[in-house]
Image (cartoon, rainbow, N blue to C red):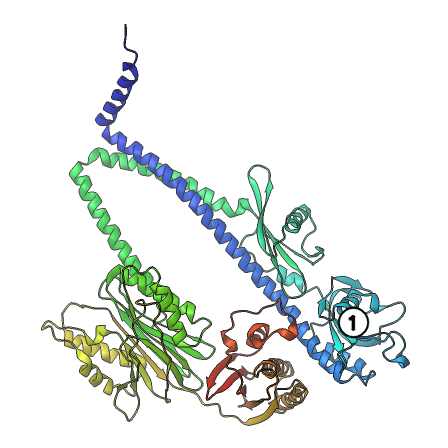
Amino acid sequence: MPNKGKAPENWWKRIGNFFKTHSNLTVILAAALLLELTTGVLYYNAQNIIHEMMGRLVRQEMKGIAMNIRKQLSKAEVVINNYTWVVTGDIEQPAWMFESTRRLVEHNPFLHGCGVAFVPNYYPEKGYWFEPYAGRRPDGSVKSMQLGSKSHDYTKLEAYSYTVEHDSDHWSEPYYDPDGAQSVVMTYSSPAHDDKGNIVAVVAADISLEWLSDIMDTPNSYKSIRRFLVSREYKLISGDDDPVYHQALALVRSDDSLTGYLTLTEGKHRKQHVFYYPVGGITGWTLICVCSDREIFAPLRKTHLALLLLSLAGLMLMGFIVWRTTRNLERLRKTNAEKERIGGELHAASQIQQSMLPASHMQRDDVAIEGFLAPAREVGGDLYDYFVRDEKLFFCIGDVSGKGAPAAMLMAVTQALFRSASAHESNPARIMHTINQTTCQGNEANMFVTLFIGVLDLPTGHLRYCNAGHDAPFLLLAGAKPATIDCAANLPVGLFEETRYNVQETHLAGGSTLFLYTDGLTEAMNNAHKLFGMERVVAVLAGCVDLTPKAVLAEAEQSMHAFVGDAEQSDDLTMLAIRYTPTQFESIMSETIVLKNDVQEVARFSDFIKSATERMGIEKSAAQEIRLAIEEAVVNVIRYAYPADTEGSIEVGVMFDGKSVKATIVDSGVPFDPTAKEKADTTLAAEERQIGGLGILLVRELMDSINYEYSGGRNILTLVKTVNR
């Protein structure tokens, strides 16, 4: 009787023998499967990466559009909120309201109209409805009128009823106003109160919606993107009213989130990506973006096809190579290929590392900087960085323990942490603490970084710094020998999370140079195994007091190379020279006022700053921007610099040198750096926003530079605007 169990066994033997006798084909088949698998994985990962990148790009564009919309709306909010104070102060002069609303519209081109709707019978002699209104006509002129009447009962309008009912600011839904604006507008309204806190009127501004089309038509990252803007009641404000809009709106309305991402399927292989994002503030608007799946992944599909063809060509080439070469030659080929790959990666890593460094040279009127970095290998562990933010120079220099790729990776992480931590922080000790906390996490290799961080206030020369085990910098000053600045002996970064770092301070005189370096300079070794040493560094720097930063580094490098000769470089070398050359503000006009921390002082300050800018002879629109920015800053200092029920003073100085206006706001209240705020909290009401939020955004927008310094127990905020270029 035949044995049936031998048939499968014989087949497996035949297959095994086939692969043994056709090893070349086996390798090719295995490579084909591996390439196909790799291509599939790459395609999947690339699809995810493109999808994520698409999401980031669209969200970033939506944030920019929302910010531009809020920027336009905030102009009206600021103007009307300020005008509410004027209305409250002149409540006994109802006839003057016609003139004031007309002037407000004339001086603010973005306003279509402005009115003050008083509570019924507030002025019995004016009748039941009294609403002084000024509106811009099609020819550009501004017409004043008494708009309130039985036919125009403003008490039934949303702008009035909502504001009175909730006693809060309000943006209305878009509507057609046949009486006042005579066009499609939206209205921003704010309540005005008497001395007892009772609402006496609603101050409102009409804004035309024509400017929305320019913002909504901002160039897209993808051609297929469709944008829609809807109101809080989901009415279409901007965009095409088509089926795509209605389908996307239905998805958005079904989602309770304020911002998010949804997908809309059309057929088997077509899909629409729907993003929505709130405009913010009190408008309740929502921005919706819809983009086609076909456009997003079309390049990837073409690339995938090209990869398949290239893979096939590669397989054919590999089959030829496998057939023609022997095992030893194949091993040698792989070894050489691996060496070339490692060499190429190291070279690419070196280029990437160099590209991470800032420009080796920076020249400004008040500071000049020169940097130099030479790794001992392809990649190294030294670093330096610098940048200017809010008239402060942030800089650092560091040396990672060890050499090569591990040190380079930690160098890159440290530099990225420095950039991130100092983006909204001006205290070098807190920056150092943040870097140390992050570096210590998961540092199983026990690598560490000696690091020096400095923050130089460019207008004053006040230098705050923090040292973490690094060599103390040299200070070069005319008439004095080179000497190191006083540095505390703190532990390097990356050793212990509980390490605490302290701030040290000094002052840089004009014309002085700060020279920072790593131990690759002092420990440079010649063929006789002698070190370059600190004494030679001091000797070189003694002749560099009056030189530029570039010349200082050149002298140090040449002296070191002359000493070392042809000996191989044993350690990474990094140098950084900073020369401080402050500019003087020579004012031809200077005015000063001292205010109390009382909101009643705002009117007095408004008269002061208006009078000052008028005497400067500045162009009207520039003067208005300057007044608006300075008033925003001063009002916030009045409100928030001192604790409640505490009296304090605010000194405001305004200077003019013929080209630039410089305002200095000084108070001795609670230390607070408004430039460290990351972004505005637009969920708060306008009167609750501090200068660190939407206020600082407005100040930055209107002024050329803003600088904060806390010195001698005082907050010093400096604003500068160039008016004659």
Vertical relation: 294 (above or below) 682: above
Looking at the image, residue 67 sits to the left or right of residue 210; the answer is: left
In this view of the protein, which residue sits in the foreground, 232 or 76? 232
Residue that numbered label 1 is attached to: 137
Q: Could you tell me which residue is drawn at 37 percent across and 37 percent down?
A: 36
Q: How many marks?
A: 1
Vertical relation: 554 (above or below) 712: above
Name the quarter where the N terminus is drawn. Answer: top left
Q: Could you tell me which residue is drawn at 61 percent across and 80 percent down?
A: 632
Residue 371 lies in what quarter of the image?
bottom left
Residue 328 image point, x, y percent: 16, 39
Residue 421 image point, x, y percent: 42, 69
Looking at the image, residue 239 sits to the left or right of residue 87; the answer is: left
How many other residues sit within 10 Å of disc 1, few (<14), some (14-19) or many (≥20)? some
In this view of the protein, which residue sits in the foreground, 66 or 500? 500
Q: Could you tell me which residue is drawn at 81 percent across and 80 percent down?
A: 98
Residue 113 image point, x, y percent: 76, 72
| Residue 224 seen in the figure | no
Looking at the image, residue 474 sits to the left or right of residue 55; the answer is: left
Q: Secondary structure at mark 1?
A: loop
Residue 193 lies in what quarter of the image?
bottom right
Vertical relation: 100 (above or below) 312: below
| Residue 612 seen in the figure | yes
**Most distant residue in the left direction:** 528
Residue 221 image point, x, y percent: 53, 55
Mark 1 residue type: Arg
Residue 107 lies in what quarter of the image?
bottom right
